[in-house]
Structures are given as structure tokens and as C-alpha cells.
Amino acid sequence: MTAAAHAQAPPPGPSQGPAPAQAPNSEAARLLSDFQNFGPHRAFVVSPDGRASWWAGASGPDPAPAIASALKRCLERTKQECKLHIVNNYTVAGHEWRELVPARSVGAIDIGRLRPQPYWSMRGPQLAAGLLVWSHGYMAGRNSTESAPQAWVGQFTRRGYDLYRFDREWITDWASDATALADAVAKAKAMGYRRVILAGQSAGAWVSLAALQRGAAADGVISIAAAHHGTVEKMRDPTRARSEWQRVLEGIKRGPRLVVVNFAGDAYDVGGRMDDARSIFAKSGVDADIIDAPEGFNGHNAADSTFSRKFGACFTAFIETGKKQAPC
């Protein structure tokens, strides 16, 4: 998933190196603000006459693909060689980005099986507003450990959250993975992170919920199109997928806030799961925002950049305050 934008002015605020000739204006402020709502890998570039472009949501081991896409887009639109100003959440202002952007944020350590998002600056447990742990989806035979987080995680990072990943190259022991994630949450809290949010898509959403079922001391979970049993057409027994879903939800205790998203036309969905969630959470008292088949978004991978723009702010509002706001 990628997102891109283009505008007529450089980003506002301090920078290193010579500033573009054109002064920042309201359009520049809007563009930079939009950029900051998106997750890694991302890049913001500016042309000599002050026009700016950006790219976000690029997968890969480092930000190079996002940088190349942003520079190409800017060149195509301005017919000028553009300069790199921001890489992920580092300001580089035209300098060689590899000299300023370390592969691992200084001082960031692994937390159990969690690792810091590569090429992403961390505040650390004492200064960060919290920790968001991204768990990726999974496809058999494909290594997803370098896949980009969904774009809306930028809504949390711009509010001061550090960003870590729970990467699993192979998914063969669900119970062990869920337990390891729960253990890592305990370690993060012991380190001083005041809040820990688990978030994921597909298999990553399922393991986030399963960790909560196993007692993870998380403050919230954002589950996007949770899946564990493969596509419905290949299931030998679809009732097993639904019964295991019910058991996971029934094991979640009141306290953390949950956002649970399910899309129409999801090939991994056996049906009825959002009704299960409503019923189970009503009995248990779990505070949950259930977003069922949002209009205009279809299929297992529907949480694209448009979805993130529409729902990202209300995700953070509910997880942070418990208040539901449109369109959630």
C-alpha cells in the first residue's frame, strides 16, 4: 500500500541547509500535516521552486523505494531535480540520507521478540506517549517481515508513540506467537512505556487479539480483517474458524479498548463474526468499536490509504479516550 501527494510549497518549520525560495503557505502546512499521518517507509521532497511531493507506505528493508518514488513523482510534475527533506521521521534537508538516518534508532533495543521499526526514530519508554506494536499479515511461502505497516499507524506516531514490529517469517505455532507477544507487552511496560497498543492486519490482527486473550497487559488492540485459517474456499471445516474466533473473543477481559474492523467480500471471513463480537463484548463489558463492512471498502486488503485517511483519526480517538466519533 502506498500513498502520494503533491503541492506548491515546501514544508513549514525549521530545517537544515538552504531553504527553498518560496515561503511556506497554508497548502504546505496541509501537505506536511497529511504526510505525518502516514506510516513508514515514507519520504518528503521539495523542488527548487518550492513545490513539494511525498510518498508513504513503501515496503522493503529500508526507505530507498519511498525516496525514489517521491523524487520521481516530483521530477515528473515539476521538471526539476528535487531535494529530499524528510525520510521517515528524520529531517535530512537535502543531505545524504544514509549519513543521517540510522538503520536502528539510537538506544532502541529489542523487546522480547519485538524489534524497532527500521530507519525510524524512537523517543524511548520514558519520553514516548506509548508504544504501538505492528503485526503484519501472512501469506504462505512469502516473507512479510519487510512489509509496510498500514498507513494509519502514522496517526499514533505523530502523537508521540514509538513504533515496533512483531515479525514472524513463518507462522507455525500460534500459541507460542501469542504468548511471546503477551510477554513482550509485559517487558515494554516494565521498561516504562505508559501505554502499549497492539495492531495488525489479517494474521497480525488475529495474533494481537490472541495475545490479549492470553492476558497481555495492552491498553488497546486494533484488529483489521483478522484471519487465521486461510480462505473460506480452502477450509475443510469453516465452523472451526468461527468457533475459534468466538473462543478468542470470549477470553478477552474488560479493560483494554478494541477496534475491530471487518470488510465485505473478505475471502477469509466465514461470516457472522461481527455479530459474535457484538454479542460477546456486550456480555463481557469489553469496550469495543466494531466497524463492520464500511461502505466503499471491499475485500481482505481494503485498508488502503483512502481507508486510513477516513478512519485513522477516529481509531486514535477511541483508543485514547474511549469516545466514538464519525465515521467509526
Image (cartoon, helix red, strand yellow):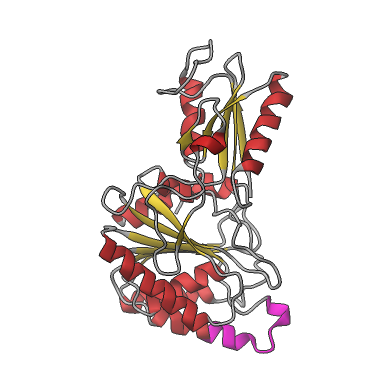
Closest to the observer, 132 or 226: 132
Closest to the observer, 233 or 220: 220
Is 281 above or below relative to 51?
Answer: below
Residue 311: x and y in percent read 48, 50
- Give the left or right position of residue 10, taking residue 284 as reference: right
Q: Residue at x 53, y 67 (%)?
A: 204
Q: Residue furthest front?
A: 99
- Give the left or right position of residue 13, taking residue 202 as reference: left
Task: Say if residue 323 shows up in the picture.
Answer: no
Is 123 above or below relative to 262?
Answer: above
Is 27 above or below relative to 302?
Answer: above
Residue 151: x and y in percent read 54, 49
- Give the left or right position of residue 217, taking residue 105 as reference: left
Closest to the observer, 116 or 301: 116
Closest to the observer, 254 or 34: 34
The count of marks equals 0
Residue 122: x and y in percent read 39, 48
Q: Which residues are magenta?
A: 231-243
Q: Quadrant of the C terminus?
A: bottom left
Q: Residue at x 68, y 84 (%)?
A: 235
Is 193 above or below relative to 30?
Answer: below
Residue 99: x and y in percent read 53, 36
Q: Is residue 20 magenta?
A: no
Q: Is residue 236 magenta?
A: yes
